């Protein structure tokens, strides 16, 4: 396929759309269970590619589902994907603007894998347009818009699945129930780990030209339309506050969700603080590459750790804690549970001997389609509310961090000494940084503000600066609506 201009692409899109002549209807009114669910994938330069593959794989196995539309603001990515579909004899429509896509009555559901700052708005607009939604993690860029997405799903009676695939693991679900039944005694700490190598993204001397194949206005959407001040637009948006949430909200949301699942807490924590920094290199990233968040639940603390540096200088190997790196560890009176991946949970006694294992998972996309057909929210393994709560725990930790200040290590230790597990976590963090030649006495970490929250209102108590970071100023016309 020759290089497409925007004008030629729109012409091509119209031709692709015309090729689809399926009758329009709403799944809330459908009685024919054998009809194909028609899916549009929005944003597929990264995770969205798995969405496309996932739905097509289900279709090949006999599931009544079709990917009928694709949407991406990168014309090159979009054109190549449209061509790939056509090469297999499949008709697919191409869109650069999600608003135009949502007007298409031949689309039943959308699968959203845009950058984080688009997740909630795209999901809300889709609900308003009568579409069901699968939305990637984190389901929001801030707490308020995540709650608005939940409200939109309920208001418009839509099926909305969060992309936290671990929830479709029946093995982990069995482990959660086994722990909650008291088989290891009381939970002492629920700990999430995101030890995942993140190298420097480099530094630029000035604004970087945006590639001509990208509609930058649409890419920015709800975020400020600022000059591109990093070398690469794609993916590295994770490490900038305007569009990303750091690894806490990137990889870490999965482990945060699992830790909350084991605890069985269904609201935000009443007290939170964070410690960390972007340490070990100087680059154009803003989010911390080393961080821990302490959620002070009454049942037991939920502690989350992020490490982007290797186990030591000169190594590419990541360190581990209790055999976990990207994992969850549930510390209990009678032992602990290690969740090392998305489908397995291993139980150890107090002496560290393995005594039990749970394993197995079903397809998360298939679960979404099941609920779309049944119109029953409880059929979802990861309803939008679950996605909101776990995403919001990442956001409140980052709010604490962003309102903090750099402090010497002894002062940090003094401030957090009342929380024993937080103190121990900080000491391990300091050892890890020292192994990477980071002296916290010279390059100080940030001690986040201790924040108290009313979980019912999802507002911080007596802290307007923190409450301002629960939302953002949205850029017209990409505004998350008050009334969804």
Image (cartoon, helix red, strand yellow):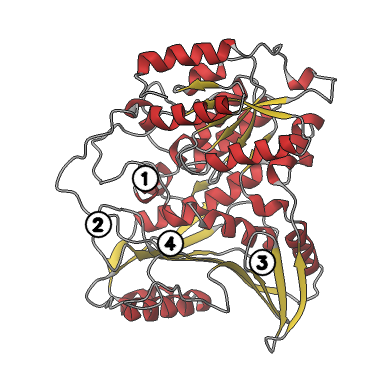
- Which SS class for mark 2? loop
**Position of residue 76 in the picture relative to residue 330 (left or right):** left
The quadrant where residue 183 appears:
bottom right
Q: Is residue 455 visible?
A: no
Asked which secondary structure carries label 4, the reply is: loop
Q: Give the mark nearest the N terminus, 3 or 1.
A: 1
In whole angstroms, how far apart are the C-alphas of marks 3 and 2? 39 Å
- Give the mark toward the camera: 3 or 2: 2
Residue at 81% over, 31% down:
374
Quick one: quadrant of the C terminus? top right
Looking at the image, tell me whether mark 4 or mark 1 is earlier in sequence order. 1
Q: Nearer the viewer, residue 332 or 255?
A: 255
For disc 1, the marked residue is 237
CA gap, disc 2 to disc 4?
28 Å
Q: Secondary structure at mark 1?
A: helix
User: Along the polypeptide, which appears first: circle 2 or circle 4?
Assistant: 2
The answer to whether the residues at label 3 and label 1 have Cβ atoms under 8 Å apart is no
Give the spatial CA distance, label 3 vs label 4.
Answer: 19 Å
- Label placed on residue 299: 3
CA neighbours of label 3 inside 10 A, class few (<14), some (14 to 19), many (20+): some
Determine the residue positioned at 64% across, 20% down: 107
Q: Which residue is mark 4?
A: 450
State if disc 2 and disc 3 touch (CB < 8 Å). Answer: no
Can you tell which mark lies on residue 53?
Answer: none
**Which mark, by number, is residue 283?**
2
Report how far apart the C-alphas of labels 2 and 1 lie in the structure. 13 Å
């Amino acid at each position: 396929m020759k290089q497409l201009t925007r004008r030629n692409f729109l012409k091509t899109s119209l031709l692709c759309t015309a090729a689809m002549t399926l009758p329009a209807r709403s799944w809330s009114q459908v009685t024919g269970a054998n009809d194909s669910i028609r899916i549009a994938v929005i944003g597929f330069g990264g995770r969205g590619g798995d969405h496309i593959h996932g739905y097509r794989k289900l279709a090949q196995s006999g599931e009544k589902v079709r990917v009928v539309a694709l949407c991406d603001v990168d014309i090159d990515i979009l054109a190549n994907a449209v061509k790939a579909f056509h090469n297999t004899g499949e008709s697919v429509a191409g869109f650069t603007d999600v608003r135009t896509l949502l007007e298409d009555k031949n689309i039943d559901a959308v699968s959203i894998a845009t950058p984080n700052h688009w997740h909630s708005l795209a999901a809300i607009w889709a609900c308003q347009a009568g579409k069901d939604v699968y939305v990637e993690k984190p389901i929001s860029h801030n707490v308020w818009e995540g709650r608005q997405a939940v409200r939109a799903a309920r208001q418009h009676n839509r099926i909305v699945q969060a992309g936290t695939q671990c929830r479709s693991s029946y093995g982990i679900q069995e482990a959660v129930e086994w722990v909650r039944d008291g088989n290891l005694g009381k939970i002492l700490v629920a700990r999430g780990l995101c030890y995942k190598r993140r190298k420097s993204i480099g530094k630029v001397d000035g604004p970087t030209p945006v590639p001509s194949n990208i509609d930058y206005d649409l890419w920015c959407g709800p975020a400020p339309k600022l000059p591109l001040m990093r070398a690469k637009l794609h993916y590295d948006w994770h490490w900038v506050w305007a569009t990303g949430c750091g690894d806490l909200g990137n990889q870490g949301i999965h482990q945060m969700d699992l830790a909350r699942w084991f605890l069985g807490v269904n609201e935000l924590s009443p007290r939170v603080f964070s410690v960390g920094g972007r340490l070990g290199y100087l680059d154009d990233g803003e989010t911390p590459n080393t961080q821990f968040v302490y959620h002070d639940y009454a049942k037991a603390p939920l502690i989350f750790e992020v490490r982007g540096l290797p186990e030591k200088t000169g190594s590419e190997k990541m360190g581990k804690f209790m055999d976990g790196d990207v994992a969850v560890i549930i510390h209990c009176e009678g032992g602990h549970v290690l969740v090392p991946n998305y489908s397995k949970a291993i139980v150890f006694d107090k002496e560290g001997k393995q005594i039990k294992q749970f394993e197995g998972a079903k397809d998360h996309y298939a679960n979404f389609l099941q609920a779309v057909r049944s119109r029953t929210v409880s059929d979802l393994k990861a309803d939008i509310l679950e996605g909101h709560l776990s995403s919001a725990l990442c956001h409140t930790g980052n709010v604490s961090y962003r309102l903090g200040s750099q402090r010497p290590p002894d002062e940090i230790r003094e401030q957090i000494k009342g929380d024993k597990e937080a103190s121990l976590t900080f000491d391990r963090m300091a050892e890890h940084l020292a192994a990477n030649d980071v002296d916290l006495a010279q390059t100080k970490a940030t001690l986040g503000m201790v924040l108290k929250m009313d979980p019912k209102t999802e507002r911080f108590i007596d802290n307007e600066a923190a409450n301002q970071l629960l939302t953002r100023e949205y850029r017209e016309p990409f505004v998350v609506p008050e009334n969804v």
